[in-house]
Image: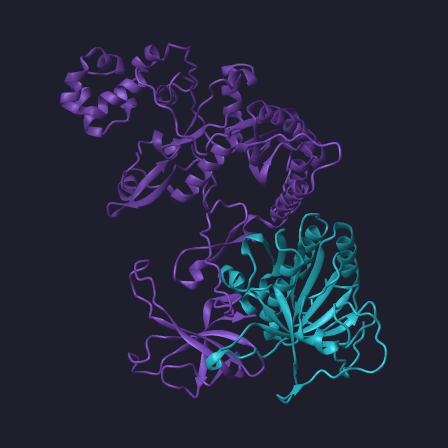
Amino acid sequence: MLRFSPPDGWQGDRPLVLTEKARGALRIAAPDATALRLGLRVGMALAEARALIPDIATAEADPAADAALLRHAAAACEIFTPLVALRGGNGLVLDVTGCAHLFGGEKELASAASRRLRRLGLTVRLAIAGTPEAAWVLARERHGTLAVPGGEAALVQTLPIAALEQAGDTTLALNRAGFLTLGDLAARPRHMLTARFGEGLTAALRRVLGEEDIRITPLRPPPEIMAEKHFPEPLGLLESLLAVLERLARDIVTALERRGVGGRAFEVSFFRADGAVRHIAVETAQATRDIASLMRLVRLRIEALADPLDPGFGFDALRLAVLRSDPFESTQPSLAGEAGTQGGERAVADLVNRLVARFGRENVRRFITRDTHDPVLAADTVPYLAETPSSPCPAPEPGSPPHRPLTLFQHPQWIEVMAEVPDSPPLRFRWRRVLHEVTRAEGPERIAPEWWRDASPAPATRDYYRVEDASGHRFWIFREGLYEDSNARPRWFLHGLFA
Amino acid sequence: MLEQNMNNETAFPLATAALHEFYAGRNDDGAALSGLALAAAGIECPTRPLLWVRQDMLDRETGTPCSTGLEAHGFASSRLILVRARDTLGAIQAGLEGARTAGLAMVLVELWGEGKAYDLTASRRFSLAAKTSGASVLVLRVAAHPAPSAAETRWLTRAAPSQALAARAPGNPAFEITLLRARNGQEGLRYCLEWDRDTRKFISRALPAAGGALIRPAPLSGALAPVPFDRQGAPVLPTRRLAG
């Protein structure tokens, strides 16, 4: 697959090669069709190629862009099946089990897929077969093959040895030994091949012949439940798309009810006619089967998108998937209206869903405490919907004022200290250009760093003091390092504010 | 009667299902503001969840809220839903979503600076939403000047020196609050409240004066209209009447 954007000063008739630096020289990473015809090969040094054909256009290979393009193509192929995997640097493997009839048969599916990928500007070779490995070798060697079930082995046996993609010397050795096709190889006892060429060769052979089947690892985990709709003509209007989505939601809810679960995470995929795919994820605080609230969340999410949904020439398919579900207790609505607390809980869960849809998952948080001495680590917030456990916080000691500040600075703020007293808090300090006269103080509370968390450099022990200034502000300040160790002036920091 | 009332522990009496505004006296009173509001929320309803909307800027200026500190302050941090908003408008929108939700104990909206988005209309919306849902809305403003709004009460909050414990240790959190405006006209009331976490009550203290000496609450002559506080006759000090 190659998408082509010509470099400067390129004319269509000149051979083009992409180059990369390898083994101390500029080498050809990918020649175009003209260059291939003229005898240029992958891995050839550019100097050597120039000696053969002086007039070559070159451009630097960009593997990151290639990978991005391949992922883009994979997303475009999700319209055919949710199970799409990447293969090598330039291939896609789709598991179309049970999908072909939706497109009118395998032949129609193959032509639709090839049309869709060509629209991205790619050269496509494809094949459909019973196992991913057989389909892969057939696509490379016999473009357009649609193997009938059980017929793969016969087709594969006619392919040359090189189709197995073994190391160059293995292929060469096999060819010299007189094996020209995979059929020749398959006819031989396997243990001899294993003894000579290793387990890798026979394993590859078994797989392409369909004697051993492996499943692909899809790029994105398949959804638990999904419903989709392909349109005969691209749709551009958001309102009509949402109407379709509501119909899909009804199907989904029926499926959820049958399983006795409710959805926690949903995903709406908009497939644009030109191959771009947009996924919109919606999470809920409680398992839900409520179509109206789901639709409201999707609407909010679309409105809050930083980069709005661009219909372009319209969308040609829409998919609604349930990514995560939880058991759902169906409650019988009481005649007198919902019970007080339960109704309130549901309302609060709905509120969280709306806030998450509108402000983003990261911005709606809850508080957790961790069992550690590090005051910053011990008190943290996590996204409300994240499943991070919180360890119980020890109850405050009765009769004593709060020992931890209400707010903490993520990075302790340096304070200028005046009138120091050995091993006790300063009498005066300056924070943010304001001088604070310490009138009350308590401490120190010595907090040693947890050296086992990050080894180097071990932070200094801190002596924390609760201090109050003349105007009644209460601060949590600390001295870095022990007083007796510090030869230089110890540094003081303000870490938090008390109410 | 008055003496007895003043010496007793007192609840912080905010009318429920209404909008109340708290202004920080100085920019560094932000933590005192949060502490007072959370303490008030702890008295109001100790079990139901509470929405706390904070503008991002506050994290830089007054630090990020800390769960251990909340627990030490006497507030169950697991009850809180914290929303971080990028600007005043976002914070108001999130706060309104919460104010319209039944089932919340209270909604705290903490704003930084003179955000123009918080105006008469926004405060009216909060006030109406609070009436409908029954959850009080507390708008906390740091680095802002009091402005006209539809709030039921408006308070100025400052941190106050605490009652020192043994060996000059700082005591319980104390706040000095001034009623700038109230719907029923009781302006200019000033209190010094100490928050007692263990009993979940505010204790009234003598007011610190500017010079450091304490102003003793003096009995007042003349009749007083009923005040929203559960004790009558608090010291009325001559304060400048603010617009709004």
Look at chain B in the picture and name its colour: cyan
User: Percent position (x, y) of residue A55?
Assistant: 36, 41
Residues A308 and B198: in front is: B198
Placement of A46 over or under B25, stated as above or below:
above
Q: Residue B53: in sight, yes or no? A: yes
Is A67 situated above or below A273?
below
Q: Is residue A157 left or right of residue A361?
A: left
Looking at the rendering, in which quadrant would you find the N terminus of chain B? bottom right
Q: Name the spot of residue A422 as percent of width and height, x first.
A: 36, 85
Locate the C terminus of chain B and report the quarter of the image it occupies. bottom right
Q: Residue at 58% across / 53% down in the picture?
A: B79
Q: Position of residue A390 (x, y in %)?
A: 46, 50
Name the tint of chain A in the rendering.
Answer: purple
Residue A448, percent from left and from top = 34, 67
Left or right of B84 in this view: A11: left
* Residue at the (46%, 37%) spot, across then down: A71
